[in-house]
Image (tube, rainbow, N blue to C red):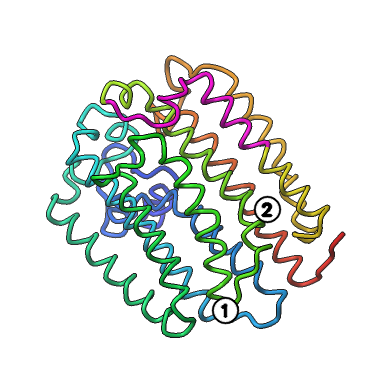
Amino acid sequence: MSVISNWVEALQTTHLREGIEPDPVSRWLIITRAAVIPMTFFSAAIGGLLAVPGGNASLGLWALCMLGLVLAHASNNMQNDYFDLEGGVDTPDSARAQYAPHPVLSGMISKRGLVRAIVLVNAVDIVIGAALTWMRGWTILGFAVAGFLISLFYVAPPLRLKHHGLGEPAVFVVWGPLMIAGTSFVTTGENPLWVWNASIPYGLLVMTVLFGKHIDKYESDAAKRVRTLPVLLGPPLARRVAQGLMLAFYVIVVLQVLTGVLGIWTLAVLGSLPRARMVLGIYSLPPPETPPKDYPVWPLWYVSAAFVLTRQAGALFTLGLVANALWPVFV
């Protein structure tokens, strides 16, 4: 297997096949769980593209903001692994250590090394945040601090948002309004209310990914008294709520097109409806007792389906906004 094939596999599945020794790039793609970072890329892309029609967008600041958000997501993933390990949530027999190598439990990095990596990435993000604040003003600091604190206390004491049914709403806030409206503000220096409205549908869709992950981890989370929303609701109701969030994404996009918030080309997201129908069907049934052949991330099930839908719908949303930037058409 070539090194590039290793990178592709790590980006797709967050691990390498048995017997494959990770190269340095693959190792860090796995440690940072880079496979899920496309969600951040699309949030940043959506935020920047919403700003383009105004005519005063700074592509350089947009790119710098996107880099900062991608690094923040990588840091957040490492922080979650560190604090869940410290809190006894992640163990050698937990789902986290089964679907992909845990950075510390797998021996890919020491606990001290993971802390150093977190500090380094956060330090780079602080520099980027300071530069953006200097160029766009103190409003940037509000977005950055809010995102950092929510991401940190998602698993860190004393708040541990995930442990009290607040992790899923926190993900909506970060990947929806904070990332999208924040990126738009960085790009233009303006903060219109309609951009906050336009950030809602994709934030809801990202939220379904976390719902799926926590449904998959229901038994282990419940046993360890980690009260995620699926633990509080129970798996059957949690699956229905996740389905409702997926459908809400499409309904809100259509309504925002009809009311002139979004351009007509964002209806490109409807091209993902066949995938959505498949995912809704998966969420209608209990998980299989054994993994399908060659299924790469068992015991995860629902989260994989939600992530594939979010990636496809996010890509179509982004392409629709690109088309709208080139040829604006509104109802």
Residue at 53% over, 38% down:
208
Can you say whether 160 is above or below 133 in the image? above
Q: Nearer the viewer, residue 119 or 197?
A: 197
Q: Nearer the viewer, mark 2 or mark 1?
A: 1
- Picture coordinates of residue 213 (x, y %)? 43, 34
- Name the disc covering residue 189, or none: 1
Where does the image place residue 312, in percent across and percent down from the top left?
A: 62, 47
Residue in the image at 31% along x and 24% along y: 220
Q: What is the crowding at mark 1: few (fewer than 14 residues within 10 Å), some, or many (at least 20)?
A: some
**Residue shown at the point (51%, 79%) measured from the top left:** 61
The residue closer to the viewer here, 78 or 197, is: 197
| Stretch in magenta | 225-247
Residue tagged 2? 316
Quarter of the rendering containing residue 177? bottom right
Where residue 267 sits in the image (x, y, percent)? 77, 51
199 on left or right of 119: right
